[in-house]
Amino acid sequence: MRPWWKGSEINDAVLIALVDRCPALTNVTVSYSRKLADAAIVALAKRCPALINVNVCDCKKLTGAAFIALADGCPGLTNVNVSYTAAS
C-alpha cells in the first residue's frame, strides 16, 4: 500500500480518485474509514461494476443510500461487510 493509504484517513476524495483510475476493482476494503461518506460509495458503485466484495466495517457516516447504490450498480456483488455502520 502507498504511505498515504491509512484506513482512518481515507475520505471521499481518496476513494473517488482510486475508483476513477481503477474501474476494474473487484475487492475493496475501507473499514474504519470514519471520514468516508455516501458520495464515495456511490462513486464506487457507479465506476466499479465488477465489484464482488466490499468491506466498509465501522464507516460510521454511511447510510442506506450507499448500500442501495452498491446493490443497483454491482450485479456480481456477493459480500458486503456493513458491521458497525450507521445502516447496520
Image: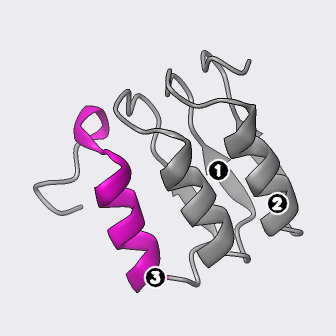
Nearer the observer, 29 or 37: 37
Q: Distance between the residues labelled 2 and 1?
A: 8 Å
* Mark 3 nearby-residue class (10 Å; few <14, some 14–19, many ≥20): few
Query: Which amino acid is tagged 2?
Result: Leu
SS state under label 2 = loop
Q: Residue 60 location in percent, x, y? A: 50, 21
Q: Is residue 11 left or right of residue 51?
A: left
Quarter of the image containing the N terminus? Answer: bottom left
Is residue 9 in the magenta section?
yes
Pointer 2 residue: 77
Label ID, residue 22 = 3
Query: Which amino acid is tagged 1?
Result: Val
SS state under label 1 = strand
Q: Residue 72 location in percent, x, y? A: 86, 61
Nearer the observer, 66 or 48: 66
Q: Is residue 56 left or right of residue 6?
A: right
Give the overall secondary structure of the magenta segment.
helix
Furthest-left residue in view? 3
Pointer 1 residue: 54
Q: In which quarter of the image is residue 53?
A: bottom right
Q: Give the range drawn in magenta.
A: 7-22
SS state under label 3 = loop
Residues tagged 2 and 1 counted as in contact (Cβ below 8 A): yes
Lower sequence index among marks 3 and 2: 3
Q: How far apart are marks 3 and 2 (CA)?
A: 17 Å
Label ID, residue 15 = none
